[in-house]
Image: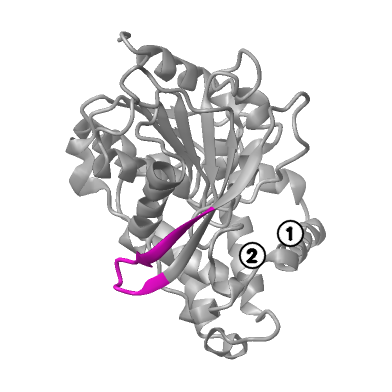
Amino acid sequence: MLLAALTLTVLLSQGQPPPSAPAVVEADFVVKDFTFTSGEKLPELRIHYRTLGAPRKDAAGVVRNAVLIMHGTGGTGGQFTGRNFAGELFGPGQPLDAAKYFIILPDDIGHGGSSKPSNALRAKFPRYGYVDMVRAEHRLLTEGLGVNHLRLVMGTSMGGMHTWMWGGMYPEFMDALMPLASLPTQIAGRNRAWRRVVIDAIRNDPEWKNGDYTTQPQSLRTAAQMLWLVGSNPIRRQAEAPTVAEADRVLDAYVANYIKSGDANDILYAVEASRDYDPGPALEKITAPLIAINSADDIINPPELQILEREIKRVRNGRAIVLPLSERTAGHGTHTMAALWKAHLAQLLAETERGGG
């Protein structure tokens, strides 16, 4: 989904719903008078969400089967309902069988059906950050859905970064954590640079008109091109676009599809939101078992940086796994291809079963 992030959700194709897909329920939760870390306020912050399954409480009234799954930059909770994700995880006998678990798929602030700049406020929309997004996720669970405990917190790209933050901000709230396609450190280096290209292209575009455009500015094309660039691995890109003409055709088709529904203010805000991401100071606070999954061909979170390998040592019950490059991996987009990593998820769930290891 885009950039799941760029850590983003890479706007992968969602595909068709899997056969015998569990029922998905959609609804909205409205937070009254939400105050952002910037001090800005919204009288009503709408959080759209999807759920599968039903919550189950123990004798003490604690919800024991809730699972929170968070999307990446530019994505929505809907990206998890297709064959590559739900088709591998949510069906009968699968790791997150919806008959057993209460699965929660929110659209984060600025995304999907939740409150976002393009609804009306445009560039007057509060400048949200990742801390605001995680706080809103927590309020959706506790106030909107009555969930007082999570069996699992997981996310892809931006959602993976939120998973690291959940572990530090609410360390007693979950049994297990699985961040995918993310690093537990500030956005810096090349990762910050490609985001700056998107941010600067839009903010410096005369057609943007300080957010008050009536037609999408041409800089939205630049944003789409950058998302295409970082969203997969070079081998796949070369295979699908092996000549000058094919590269232009594939890129043009991606951009044309993106701008049909994309909005410059929405992507600008979404990319800028990573500015306050910094889970590093709270890594020692994470107590729940955590398995971080990255892929060796992810050019947003390249393994040669060795950041994941270094920082995971600070997580008391943390492990890091980097999936090797293969014909099946897709760079950053590997995060949504659950078949490649669901065995690690099943292992984490087994290890953290109540009374388990």
Q: Is residue 97 above or below residue 183?
A: above
Q: CA distance from mark 2 to mark 1?
A: 8 Å
Q: Which residue is mark 1?
A: 254
Can the viewer see residue 312? yes
Q: Which mark is residue 224?
A: 2
Q: Secondary structure at mark 2?
A: helix
Is label 2 in contact with label 1 (beta carbons under 8 Å)?
A: yes
Q: Is residue 218 above or below residue 81?
A: below
Give the quarter of the image for residue 148: top left
Residue type pointed to by label 1: Tyr
Q: Nearer the viewer, residue 100 or 308?
A: 100
Which residues are drawn in magenta? Answer: 29-42
Can the viewer see residue 233? no
Residue type pointed to by label 2: Ala
Is 30 colored magenta in this rendering? yes
Q: Which mark is residue 155?
A: none
> Percent from the top left, x then y, of residue 258?
71, 62
Sequence-wise, which precedes: disc 2 or disc 1? 2
In the displayed structure image, the side of residue 81 where residue 331 appears, left or right = left
